[in-house]
Each structure stands twice: as structure tokens, then as C-alpha cells.
């Protein structure tokens, strides 16, 4: 079970001693990396080691604690995308920030020459305030000349750095942007095995709540229960959560000057001509709009379509799903893995992976975090 078993296990074993907000960042990173392996790299097995992610570990024999499950639950089904591509959210232990400073949390929580017992700081990226191809990619993944040649590589996070940021009151989404770029998107899947991402319309409703809104300039959307119950194309544009309906140009003929109701529209007449119209989402009565539901904040969700199919982080092999003609990414299908669509976890949790963990995890100190090996960036390719 991804949400109730796998993600809490990875959170506990990879960075289990960190504060809650850092654990939430770890949960999103673990889930996004899993989705990358299943849906982009086409893997059917996720390794229980630093070659992929440590899911069960001898230093937590009782499994994840309540705080690890809380981190998974409070980020349920969240994963990272960039331009509609699932991000391989690389993370390593990184250096231990020597002088955390609440006056400069992002600056002081960088490596800053601190102790680097796992020798992984060289892969960490700091992309706060950066977007597009201005970000720094990590050598853990394939680095093309144009970053859009591998939209899955958006950098690498430091687990020690995230623990530092959490200790200074920084939230997990800001931590993710600090490492992967300001234009990273925290998307939401359905949380089930197969992890079908929600549509852009449903994500819009999750973000905006119940009511009628303008999805963009030409489409209105009705939201109920965190899902899109209706999406309607507006030929003459959308305003205040309703399709614009041009009034009858003769409406004011014979009418007195002032505000009048024309169906659900408020119309102001002056000298027998229309001087102003307004859509009333909840209807019009007595020459005024009825109390309105909240309106869209003006953000266009679907926007311009992103680039076409991308490549995996080796530059070859299966591609990410293409963006549809309407700019909304198609639904990602269920995992090709075993057990009814779920990938399987492989590897001996107390065997050979322990040698890798000694190199990359630094388990001897509570400040040292387990980390990915280079194998994470270059998983075996599925058949072409």
C-alpha cells in the first residue's frame, strides 16, 4: 500500500529523525521518485536500498512511528511535476549546516562548508528564485544541453538542509522550491495503487473549493467536493464564474435609466442604451446582483501547453505522456507492475544494501541522513 505502508516506511528510514516539515518534504520526494520509476522509467520493482529508496531498515525495527505516518498523511498523494512531467526528485544526505540562522534560513541552511560525512554535498542544488532552464540540474541525472531534453531532472535536495530549514520554521513546499526551483508544481494523485493523477480541472477545484469559477478566459467550472462537476465553454468569455451572455441591444428601449435585471445579468441603462452589464453568478433581483460565491483569483490553470514528450533521465527509452491539445496532460495509466498495478519492493532490508548504507547514510549520527546512490539516476532501462 503506497500511502499507508510504503511512503511512511521510506520517510522513517531515509530521514526519520528530522522535524515534521522536513519529513513532509521527504514524503513528497519519496512519492515523486516512486512515480517516476513506475510511470516514466517503466520499472516494476523498486529496490529497498539506497540504489532507490530505503523502505525497511534494521535501525527502525518497529517500522514507522506516528510522526512518519503523519508526514505521509498530510501530504497524501502529492508528488512533483515540472511542465507536466513527473520529476525524479533526487535527494541525498548533504552537508550538515554549521550555523543555522533564523534571520537567513535559506542561506544558512546550505552546506556552507559544514561536515559532509557521506560525501554527497556535491550533488545538492540550490534553486530558490530560479525557474525554467535557469535552475541548476544535478549530475545524479542526465544533464542535457537544453533542460527540456530531460524535464525529470530538476536538481537534488539535501536532507540535512531540509532538517535545518524545518528547525527554522520553513514549510515543506518552500523547501522543495529551494532545491528544485520556484516553478516546481506539487501535484496531487488519487493516492491509490496506480496513482492516477487528478485532472487539471479537479486540481483547480482542490485549490479553489466549492463554487462556480472561471477556469480560464473561455471556460467556467463548477466545483463540488474537491472535483469538477461541470466544465462549460463560454463562447463570449467567462466573468465572475459565469459565461458572458451579451444582452439584447434593444433591452433598454423604453426602459427608465438605471440598473435593471436582464435574467441573471445586471444591466445599466442610460438614454435608452446599455451603458454597463455585469454577470450575476447567483442571479439578479431588484436591480442588483444577489450575494455572490467566491470568484476565481484570476490564476489560469491550464495555460499554454508544455513541450511534447520528454525522455527519461538516461536520454533514451520510454517517454512521458504527451500534453493534450487542450493543454491538460492526459491521465497517467496504472502501473505496469505486479500485485494489481502496484510496484513491488525488492532487496534484503538487512543484507547487501547495508554496505551501501554505510557509504551513503551516515547512520552513526542522528544528524546524518540516508541518501541516494548514483544508481538512482540511472536505473536499468526497460525494454525499448
Image (cartoon, helix red, strand yellow):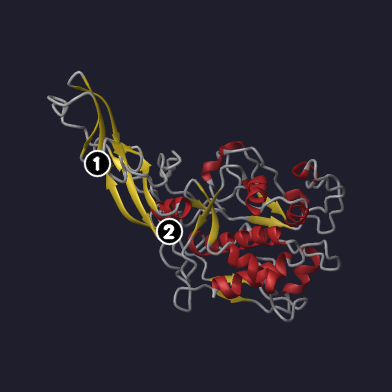
Where residue 156 appears, as percent x and y from the top left, is 67, 51
Residue at 44 percent across and 77 percent down: it is 340
Please identify the quadrant where the N terminus is shown.
Answer: bottom right
Residue at 64 percent across and 45 percent down: it is 137
Would you name the residue on which mark 2 appears?
Answer: 226
Q: Tell whether 87 sits left or right of 108.
A: left
| 13 vs 260: above or below | below
Q: Tell whether 77 sits left or right of 164.
A: left
| 37 vs 236: above or below | below
Where residue 83 appears, as percent x and y from the top left, is 49, 45
Please identify the quadrant where the C terminus is shown.
Answer: bottom left
Would you name the residue on which mark 1 appears?
Answer: 264
Asked which secondary structure carries label 2, the reply is loop
Mark 2 is surrounded, within 10 Å at the Cα level, by few (under 14), some (14 to 19) or many (20 or more) other residues, namely: some
Taking depth in this image into account, of 273 and 82 the one nearest to the observer is: 273
Taking depth in this image into account, of 255 and 108 the one nearest to the observer is: 255
Where residue 311 appears, as percent x and y from the top left, is 49, 51
Q: Tell whether 204 sits left or right of 22.
A: left
Quarter of the image holding residue 181?
Answer: top right
Amino acid at each position: 500500500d503506497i500511502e499507508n505502508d510504503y511512503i511512511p516506511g521510506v520517510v522513517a528510514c531515509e530521514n526519520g529523525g528530522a522535524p515534521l516539515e522536513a519529513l513532509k518534504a521527504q514524503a513528497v520526494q519519496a512519492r515523486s521518485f516512486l512515480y517516476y520509476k513506475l510511470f516514466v522509467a517503466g520499472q516494476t520493482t523498486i529496490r529497498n536500498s539506497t540504489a532507490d529508496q530505503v523502505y525497511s531498515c534494521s535501525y527502525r525495527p518497529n517500522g514507522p512511528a506516528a510522526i512518519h505516518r503523519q508526514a505521509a498523511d498530510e501530504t497524501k498523494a502529492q508528488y512533483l511535476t515540472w511542465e507536466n512531467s513527473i520529476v525524479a526528485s533526487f535527494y541525498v544526505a548533504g552537508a550538515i549546516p554549521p550555523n543555522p540562522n533564523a534571520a537567513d534560513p535559506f542561506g544558512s541552511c546550505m552546506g556552507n562548508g559544514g561536515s559532509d560525512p557521506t560525501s554527497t554535498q556535491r550533488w545538492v542544488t540550490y534553486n530558490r528564485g530560479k525557474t525554467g532552464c535557469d535552475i541548476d540540474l544535478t549530475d545524479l541525472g542526465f544533464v542535457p544541453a537544453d533542460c527540456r531534453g530531460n524535464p525529470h531532472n530538476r536538481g537534488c535536495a539535501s536532507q540535512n538542509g531540509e532538517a535545518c530549514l524545518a528547525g527554522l520554521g520553513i514549510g515543506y513546499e518552500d523547501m522543495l522550491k529551494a532545491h528544485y526551483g520556484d516553478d516546481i508544481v506539487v501535484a496531487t494523485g488519487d493516492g491509490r495503487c496506480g496513482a492516477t493523477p487528478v485532472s487539471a480541472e479537479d486540481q483547480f477545484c482542490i485549490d479553489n473549493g466549492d463554487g462556480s469559477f472561471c477556469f480560464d478566459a473561455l471556460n467556467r467550472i463548477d466545483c463540488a467536493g474537491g472535483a469538477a462537476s461541470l466544465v462549460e465553454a463560454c463562447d463570449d468569455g467567462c466573468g465572475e464564474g459565469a459565461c458572458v451572455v451579451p444582452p439584447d441591444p434593444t433591452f433598454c428601449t423604453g426602459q427608465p435609466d438605471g440598473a435593471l435585471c436582464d435574467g441573471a445579468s445586471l444591466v445599466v441603462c442610460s438614454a435608452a442604451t446599455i451603458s454597463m452589464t455585469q454577470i450575476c453568478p447567483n442571479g439578479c433581483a431588484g436591480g442588483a446582483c444577489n450575494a455572490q460565491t467566491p470568484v476565481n483569483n484570476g490564476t489560469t490553470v491550464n495555460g499554454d501547453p508544455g513541450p511534447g514528450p520528454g525522455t527519461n533521465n538516461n536520454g533514451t527509452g520510454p517517454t512521458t505522456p504527451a500534453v493534450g491539445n487542450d493543454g491538460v496532460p492526459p491521465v497517467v495509466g496504472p502501473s505496469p507492475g505486479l500485485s494489481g498495478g502496484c510496484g513491488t519492493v525488492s532487496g534484503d532490508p538487512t543484507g547487501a544494501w547495508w554496505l551501501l548504507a554505510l557509504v551513503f547514510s551516515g547512520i552513526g549520527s542522528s544528524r546524518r541522513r540516508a541518501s541516494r546512490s548514483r544508481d538512482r539516476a540511472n536505473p536499468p532501462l526497460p525494454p525499448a
